[in-house]
Image (tube, rainbow, N blue to C red):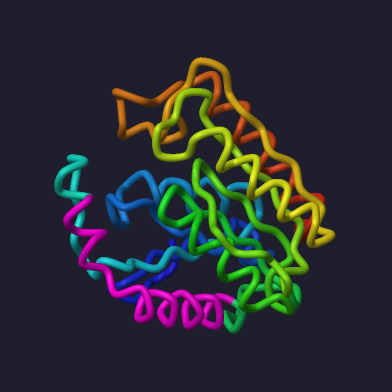
């Protein structure tokens, strides 16, 4: 782990350099799980940075998360995400002209927005159980999505709508749906939803996708 700003977490690969990946947290905040994702990405050869959109606040219940996310200033959050991407790309350890972005739930919405807002900077987007209402007119990134079979937050028709819009925009896109799972199935710190088998498959697909789109530094 690199010495990080108070409002973010940064992890470096063992070799010291690698392509950059921005990680955007769900509505729980910058949890230990999100930090672990950064560490796992670093173990795969990437420079990972996760901004803290809640500035130190972390919650565990849905009721608390609804309140906290409801207070989030969307405009300020977008500015912080863009600034985090720029910091990631200017780290001495980061290699390559374009980065990847991984977003979970709330973070997935922002990940898709960022790819459309900064098309020259984002080459790959991975979203976990999160969508966006954008038309993706500017986006140039390839996109991979991981969704639950049973998800009241992201129902199948909404997921299909985003998939169709990405295709219509000419994007390379692959969405996966994991049978028997619910929202947050990838997150180990959500024992009520975590599905180990689905999470392991999703991680394998994610790292293969990042390697294909961003490469690695040997």
Residue 210 visible to an observer of this rendering: yes
Q: How many marks?
A: 0
**x%, y% of residue 203?**
60, 36
Q: Quadrant of the N terminus?
A: bottom left
Q: Residue at x 53, y 43 (%)?
A: 128
**x%, y% of residue 53?**
32, 68
Q: Residue at x 59, y 56 (%)?
A: 14
- Residue 173 in the figure: left or right of residue 113: right
- Residue 210 in the figure: left or right of residue 199: right
Based on the picture, tell me whether residue 165 belongs to the magenta stretch. Answer: no
* Magenta highlight range: 66-88
**100 is higher (above) or lower (below) than 85:** above
Depth check, front residue: 126 or 67: 67
Residue 218 visible to an observer of this rendering: no
**204 is higher (above) or lower (below) than 107:** above
Residue 122, picture quadrant: bottom right
**x%, y% of residue 113?**
56, 68
Q: Residue at x 39, y 25 (%)?
A: 194
Q: Quadrant of the C terminus?
A: bottom right
Depth check, front residue: 65 or 40: 65
Q: Residue at x 31, y 52 (%)?
A: 27
Q: Outermost residue, top direction?
A: 180
Q: Main secondary structure of the magenta part?
A: helix
């Amino acid at each position: 782990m690199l010495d990080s700003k108070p409002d973010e977490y940064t992890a470096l690969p063992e070799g010291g350099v690698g392509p950059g990946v921005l990680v955007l947290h769900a509505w729980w905040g910058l949890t230990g799980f999100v930090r672990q994702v950064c560490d796992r990405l670093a173990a795969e050869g990437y420079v990972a940075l996760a901004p803290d959109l809640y500035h130190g606040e972390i919650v565990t219940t849905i009721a608390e998360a609804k309140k906290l996310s409801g207070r989030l200033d969307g405009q300020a959050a977008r500015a912080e995400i863009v600034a985090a991407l720029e910091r990631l790309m200017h780290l001495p350890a980061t290699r390559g002209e374009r980065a990847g972005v991984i977003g979970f739930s709330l973070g997935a919405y922002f990940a898709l927005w960022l790819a459309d807002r900064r098309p020259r900077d984002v080459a790959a987007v991975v979203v976990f159980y999160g969508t966006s209402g954008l038309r993706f007119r500017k986006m140039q990134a390839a996109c991979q999505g991981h969704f639950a079979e049973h998800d009241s937050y992201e129902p199948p028709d909404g997921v299909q709508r985003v998939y169709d819009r990405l295709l219509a925009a000419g994007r390379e896109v692959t969405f996966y749906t994991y049978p028997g799972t619910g929202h947050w199935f990838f997150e180990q710190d959500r024992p009520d939803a975590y599905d180990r088998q689905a999470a392991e498959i999703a991680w394998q697909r994610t790292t293969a996708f990042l390697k294909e789109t961003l490469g690695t530094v040997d």
